[in-house]
Image (tube, helix red, strand yellow):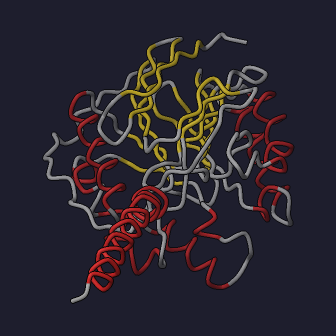
Amino acid sequence: MTRRHLIVVLASGALLILGSAVLLQVAYPWARWQEDFFPGSPPEVTLERRAWTVSDDSISFAAVGDTGSGGRNAMDIARQMAIAYDERPFGTVLHAGDVSYYGSIADRWKQVFVTPFQPLLEAGVEFHIAVGNHEYEEEASAAANAEITALLERTAATGRYYSVRRGPAEFFVLDSSTPLVVGTGADDQLQWLESALRRSTAPWKIALLHHPPYSSGPRGSWLQVREALEPIFIRGGIQLVVAGHDHFYERTRPQEGVVYVISGAGCKRSPVEPGELSAVALETLQFMVFHIDGSTLRGQALDQTGKVVDRFVIREDAS
């Protein structure tokens, strides 16, 4: 090998190493955070069954959204949720939608839901799941209806929108897809929500939906959802709204007495910069736990390692 050939070989090798390093820097974080393709280990935790307590003035519950990869990020979040239950049990999980990515709910239910949440399911925890865009894709169709049906059949849902009372809290599970917020089916859902809030005697009223009325992410707030629902939330005394869709964590400052949180980073992570209405906005995988004790609601957001990344308090009589 001549000196010239040796230089060419060494240069080619250096370029190959440099290119591989650049590819890892770009592709690995994207795959690790944005799409969660890599497999993970399911939680190996045994939890005490029905260990939570609920009274007239106290309850603990959790929230998460957009968990539907079945990959290692989703497994990490589910594992930390099981650990959180073990430390302070909760009997209800509010799931903000997008249960299944990369395939149908019927085909992937075990992989994306049963396997990661097995410890919680075996402990008897109930999940209430809002319809997400990956269940509906924003357009009515036979395939979309089949996805909705598959979701409802596998959960505690009594319909595409409904409410359930647990202790001092009433949870209002909403369908924020276009036909049921601003389209042909909107009147029925909005009238139901108005009536249900008027009838409610719960001191704490909490709404769950997929599309965030307020968001500082690149896609921004869902203004049609905000326009349709926010006046009803304010009139009806909703104190907390839990949404997903955007793959980060954000909590607003109270808007007319309502705190909005985005908990959509159950397996994917996307960028966010705090906006003028943000109390906290973080690009992190996460889920949430809440504890109501009388007139006080305490919330925490935890990441995939179990680290608390946000704490906040809402008072029942706050305005």
Question: Residue 289 at x, y = what percent?
Answer: 41, 32
208 lies above or below 31: above
Tell me the quadrant of the picture where the C terminus can be found: top right
The residue drawn where x is 41% and y is 26% is 59
312 lies above or below 78: above
Foreground residue among 267 and 170: 267
The residue drawn where x is 56% and y is 38% is 171
24 lies above or below 176: below
For this view, does 63 lie left or right of residue 132?
Answer: left
Foreground residue among 303 and 206: 303
Tell me the quadrant of the picture where the N terminus can be found: bottom left
For this view, does 183 lie left or right of residue 218?
Answer: right
Q: Quadrant of residue 62?
A: top left
Foreground residue among 23 and 118: 23
The residue drawn where x is 54% and y is 35% is 282
Question: Residue 84 at x, y = what percent?
Answer: 28, 34
Question: Residue 209 at x, y = what percent?
Answer: 63, 48
Q: Residue furthest front?
A: 3
Q: Quadrant of residue 231?
A: top right
The residue drawn where x is 40% and y is 81% is 107
| Number of marks | 0
For this view, does 262 lie left or right of residue 214?
Answer: left
196 lies above or below 252: below
Question: Residue 194 at x, y = what percent?
Answer: 78, 40
